[in-house]
């Protein structure tokens, strides 16, 4: 049996051979090493770029030095120092401006310059991107659109070498990533319902959050990719 697509999500806990560098020997049929070794080889060659290699190397060093010791804010500071960044941008949801102020102060205390832009910057009405009044959160008045493209362009223009995203909405964060010129990391992933801890929904998918499943939910947890992803 062969597979069309990589399926790492289905790799059994007792396998996960890539951790030991044994993918070719022990990887399942849907392992990327079996499905698409050409792309893996091409991607590996990209690490020959000095800047890519520098970022990857310093990321790994920070991972090792702070493993299970540093919180993510500490990791951001350590990584930025190791890379040699001088100016950091903060792209925040307007609901996280108070936390962005704390982060900005922490970064400045470590010697970084900081620029910060909230998502409602520009005050552009949602009607300007085609929303009807009844599609707004609070119909009947002005409601500014989230403006991640402007956030990215402002941070680009003001020389931010490294950006930190704080709580941008799904899709808005994607537009920020697309338009930001500086390398970007995420500090906060918004999930208002779960206290900004979205992985909780996956951990509770068989109990409190069983509503997440669609009509084709398998009877038991799958251990192989869906039928449409393999070729007999």
Image: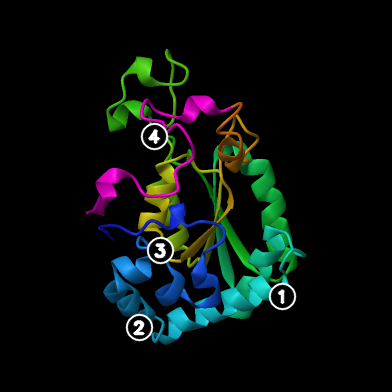
Residue 99 visible in the current orientation: yes
Q: Quadrant of the C terminus?
A: bottom left
Q: Residue at x 36, y 56 (%)?
A: 178
Mark in the foreground, 4 or 3: 3
Q: Nearer the viewer, residue 173 or 67?
A: 67
Residue picked out by circle 1: 65
> Residue 63, image x and y in percent?
65, 71
Above-or-below relation of 213 to 80: above
Q: Quadrant of residue 79?
A: bottom right
Q: Quadrant of residue 37?
A: bottom left
- Determine the CA span between mark 2 and mark 4: 43 Å
Q: Is 185 left, or right, of 3 in this rendering?
A: right
> Residue 167, image x and y in percent?
56, 43
Q: Residues within 10 Å of mark 1 (few under 14, many from 20)?
A: few
Residue picked out by circle 3: 28
Q: Earlier in the sequence, mark 1 or mark 4?
A: 1
Q: Residues within 10 Å of mark 4 (few under 14, many from 20)?
A: some
> Residue 191, image x and y in percent?
57, 36
Q: Earlier in the sequence, mark 1 or mark 3?
A: 3
Q: Earlier in the sequence, mark 4 or mark 3?
A: 3
Q: Residue at x 45, y 29 (%)?
A: 213
Residue picked out by circle 2: 45
């Amino acid at each position: 049996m062969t597979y069309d697509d990589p399926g790492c999500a289905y790799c059994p806990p007792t396998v996960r051979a890539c951790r030991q560098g044994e993918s070719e020997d022990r990887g399942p049929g849907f392992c990327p090493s079996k499905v698409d070794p050409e792309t893996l080889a091409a991607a590996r060659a990209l690490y020959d770029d000095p800047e890519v290699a520098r970022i990857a190397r310093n990321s790994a060093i920070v991972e090792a030095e702070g493993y299970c010791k540093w919180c993510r804010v500490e990791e951001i500071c350590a990584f930025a120092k190791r890379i040699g960044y001088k100016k950091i941008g903060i792209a925040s949801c307007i609901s996280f401006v108070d936390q962005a102020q704390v982060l900005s102060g922490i970064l400045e205390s470590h010697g970084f310059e900081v620029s910060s832009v909230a998502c409602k910057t520009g005050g552009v009405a949602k009607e300007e991107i085609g929303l009807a009044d009844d599609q707004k959160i609070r119909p009947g008045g002005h409601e500014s659109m989230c403006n991640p493209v402007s956030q990215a362009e402002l941070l680009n223009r003001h020389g931010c070498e490294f950006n930190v995203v704080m709580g941008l909405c799904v899709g808005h964060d994607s537009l920020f990533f697309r338009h930001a010129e500086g390398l970007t990391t995420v500090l906060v992933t918004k999930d208002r319902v779960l206290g900004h801890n979205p992985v909780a929904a996956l951990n509770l998918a068989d109990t409190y959050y069983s509503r997440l499943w669609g009509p084709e939910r398998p009877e038991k947890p799958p251990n192989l990719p869906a039928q449409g992803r393999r070729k007999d």
